[in-house]
Amino acid sequence: MSALRVVFMGTPDFAVPTLSAIIGHGHEVVACYTRAPAPAGRGMALRLSPVHEAANRFGLPVLTPATLKTDEAAEIFASHQADVAVVVAYGMILPKALLDLPPLGCLNLHASLLPRWRGAAPIQRAILSGDTETGVAVMKMAEGLDTGPVGMVEKLAITPNLTAGEAHDRLAVLGADVMIRALAALSRGGLSFVEQALEGVEYAKKITNEECRIDWSLPSATVHNQVRGLSPFPGAFTFADFGKGPERLKILRTEKMDLSGTPGTVLDDTLTIACGDGAVRLLELQRAGSKPMAAVDFLRGSKLISGMVVG
């Protein structure tokens, strides 16, 4: 494998393992593009993106342009004289003027089995929909949303209790490995691409707050998938009254139970709640202003007893 000159473009935690792997395998990252620092936390201080922080640790030049659609942005991009661009959850659309610049193209790592779950929230949507597998795909970027031809794919089984957070972490590591293999093949002219199928296209739209509230009239399988598909962020939630009025309660982990009752009713003293069909037992949850905790710890300080109704 010959070393490549790489422009890396990414923003969140998911992208960091790929950046680290590219450097670790001897490629030269000539520039790192990421989203600009944004206010975060209670003090709303500007916070660097995870990729920005990683790039600083590696001593890489970092760019945070507000747009890529100007002639100046194209000139700067061209000045890197990169062989290839690697894009992982960057958060900005690359215009055709940039896509055409690297001689070996622009490769995108996407966390789904394309063409299923193109778009912003592929990991969450796969679990919310009850999919039994997901994966990562390396595609050559084209104009359009995740429409380019695919060069490599690796699958990951979605086990019955796997959460979006767990899948995210596994896919980040798997994706880094796949991208390294793709770059190796690309460097020797051995990476071929296959156009995506026209059938089976699904769009993974952003998660809305309305989707996070649990509807206890739905079947237990649907509620269970909602909880794990939104855990740990943004988190499925319900409301419960602990004596001072309704309080938002985030549910982070559940298990399906073969019990029944009026939807939303607490069925026992181990946090089993009836759904429209079956029930779920709460295993991990979080009160507003508190840290996530296991059900057994939650019950020591919060009363959610048999007969109570949540919603």
Image (tube, rainbow, N blue to C red):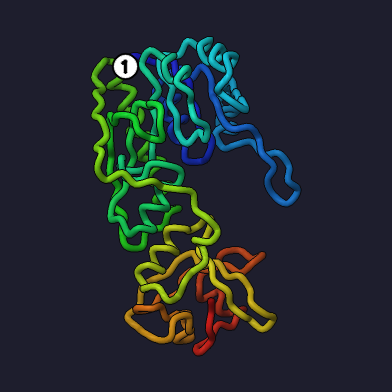
- The residue positioned 47% from the left and 40% from the top of the image is 14
Visible residue check, residue 131 = yes
- The residue positioned 67% from the left and 84% from the top of the image is 243
- The residue at which mark 1 appears reads as 187
Is residue 244 depicted above or below 232 in this figure? below
Q: Where does residue 7 sit, x and y in percent of width and height? A: 48, 20
Q: Where does residue 174 sit, x and y in percent of width and height? A: 35, 40
Amino acid of disc 1: Ser
Residue 198: quarter of image: top left
Query: Front-most of 285 and 98?
Result: 98
Label count reads: 1
Is residue 241 depicted above or below 50 in this figure? below
- The residue positioned 35% from the left and 83% from the top of the image is 259
Q: Secondary structure at mark 1?
A: helix
Visible residue check, residue 64 = no
Is residue 10 depicted above or below 130 in this figure? above
Relative to 54, 205 lies left or right: left
Residue 161: quarter of image: bottom left
Please identify the residue farthest to the bottom as the structure is shown: 307
Q: Where does residue 38 sit, x and y in percent of width and height? A: 66, 39
Q: Where does residue 13 sit, x and y in percent of width and height? A: 51, 41
